[in-house]
Amino acid sequence: MDGVSFPAPETATDVVCGRTVLPASAGLPLLFRGCRYWFCSQACRQAFKREPERHVEARPDAGVPAGPPPVERRSPFRVRAGPPPADDEPAPR
Ligand SMILES: [Zn+2]
């Protein structure tokens, strides 16, 4: 796993101008504070780069969390289901 190719949403909001953008055609997102942002144009991209905090605060919902996709921890082998080993030593009083 390279840790970069997270699935992109179908649509995203341009955090600068508020337009809906299609990540599939918008190119690489910018990462800021663990969220991804797509832009309708290079102009918006540059505007975001200049003042990311201001734009993020104005549209806090525009970012798409860039965390890794949920990993299902499922072993191909059955985990032996049984009671935990009995603790037959009495607790000291
Ligand atoms: Zn824009």
Image (cartoon, helix red, strand yellow):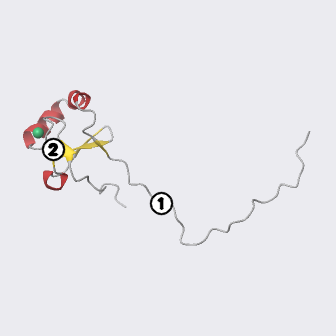
- In which quadrant of this rendering is ligand 1 seen? top left
Task: Return the x and y of residue 42 as percentages of the image width and height.
Answer: 9, 42
Q: Residue at x 30, y 54 (%)?
A: 4
Q: Which quadrant is home to the N terminus?
A: bottom left
- CB under 8 Å between discs 2 and 1: no
SS at mark 2 in the image: strand
Q: Which residue is mark 2?
A: 20
Q: Residue at x 19, y 29 (%)?
A: 51
Extreme-bottom residue of the structure? 77
* Earlier sequence position, callout 2 versus callout 1: 2
Amino acid type of disc 1? Answer: Glu
Task: Return the x and y of residue 75 as percentages of the image width and height.
Answer: 54, 67
Give the CA distance from mark 2 to mark 1.
32 Å
Residue 60 appears in which quarter of the rendering? top left
Q: Which residue is mark 1?
A: 72
Q: Is residue 1 left or right of residue 89?
A: left
Amino acid type of disc 2? Answer: Thr
Residue situated in front as seen by the camera: 62 or 44: 62
Q: Residue at x 12, y 35 (%)?
A: 17
Q: Is residue 14 left or right of residue 41?
A: right
Say if 44 sits above or below 74 in the image.
Answer: above
Local crowd size for mark 1, using a 10 Å CA cut-off: few (<14), some (14–19), many (≥20): few
Say if 40 sits above or below 50 in the image.
Answer: below
